[in-house]
Amino acid sequence: MVGKLAVVAVGGNSLITDPKHPDIQHQWDAVRQTTEHLAQLIAEGWSIVVTHGNGPQVGYILRRAEIAAAQGIHSVPLDLIVADTQGSIGYMLQQQLDNSLRRLGINRTVVTVVTQVRVDPADPAFSHPTKPIGGFMTEEEARHYEGEGWQVMEDAGRGWRRVVASPRPQMIHEINAIRALILSDYIVITVGGGGIPVVRDERGELKGTYAVIDKDLASSALAQTLRADLLVISTGVEKVALNFNKPNQRTLDVLTLQEAKGYIAEGHFGVGSMLPKIEAAVDFVQMGGPQALITDPANLLRAIRGETGTRIIPG
């Protein structure tokens, strides 16, 4: 029986806690820490659906494919790379969440669903890429790769990154299967990396497209469809801040819908970092969701108890 339902979105960057050590062993360490916090939410009585980002991982796989292509190995399209990360990150999360739950004496089955998400082929995002993928670079490195055909941008004061198109999610194709699994008491990991971006062609058939959907917007769409009680967006900071990384930085405990929209209009949030998180929270609350919460993995439980984090509420 499903109790209070929270959709918890885990950031792709939070699975790489140290940009200087993005290797798989360090990702396993980060996943173990994250699943300890997720297990605590379940122990508190929450039913959770887990989503995750994949920006850094997609960038590394794409670069690896480009290097291999120079040696005559076939290239890999971006939709298949997103599918690859859904499988690999989903596997890591479901294995370690199972281990974390066992340590708490909880016996539940965790399952990953490879998820397709419909987008509009006419979405203007295809002509204006803004979604950062891969690791951080200096401006000099970024300009070098720009000369090789990459599109790059500065990412919220943290360095330069490659960017690709990020169309808005329209519909989660496997939603009925996801809902059935939740109702059968499975813990579901889904919409990984925002979902595999697909479009309907002129014959009405599904096919992948070159893009990466923002996982926060897709998580919001999932939370709306499931009528979740809470949307939790886990990121690299404990609270949302105005004037981030500036002398006049101010953290926020609660944001009303109207305040959040005002701050978006004033340009307070980074395009490739905090902006999609605030937009996702606004979408969820505006469409009837009770509240959204933004915090870092270490403070998930405290934030759900109302002790920290930034809440977005109606009003």
Image: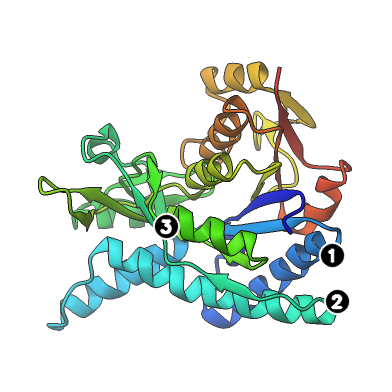
Residue under circle 1?
43
Residue in the picture at 24% in, 48% down: 199
Q: Position of residue 44 (x, y in %)?
A: 86, 59
Q: Is residue 244 left or right of residue 270?
A: right
Side (left or right) of 76 relative to 267: left
Question: In the picture shown, does residue 65 fall above or below 225?
Answer: below
**Looking at the image, residue 48 lies above or below residue 272:** below
Q: Which of pointers 2 and 3 indicates the residue nearer the eye?
A: 3
Q: Quadrant of residue 49?
A: bottom right
Q: Are marks 2 and 3 in contact (CB under 8 Å)?
A: no
Q: Secondary structure at mark 1?
A: helix
Residue 147 place in picture, x, y as percent: 20, 53
Residue 37: in sight, yes or no? Answer: yes
> Element type at marker 3?
loop
Residue depicted at 74% across the width and 63% down the height:
38
Q: Is the residue marked by circle 1 packed among few (<14), some (14-19), or many (20+) residues within 10 Å?
A: some
Tag 3: amino acid: Glu
Numbered disc 2: secondary structure: loop
Residue 160 x, y percent position in the rendering: 42, 50
- The tag on residue 174 is 3
Query: Residue 25 versus residue 10: which sits nearer the camera?
Result: 10
Q: Give the Cα distance between marks 2 and 1.
A: 8 Å
Mark 2 near mark 1, Cβ–Cβ under 8 Å? yes
Q: Position of residue 77 (x, y in %)?
A: 23, 65
Mark 2 is surrounded, within 10 Å at the Cα level, by few (under 14), some (14 to 19) or many (20 or more) other residues, namely few
Of label 3 and label 1, which has the lower sequence position? 1
Q: CA distance from mark 2 to mark 3?
A: 31 Å
Q: Quadrant of the N terminus?
A: bottom right
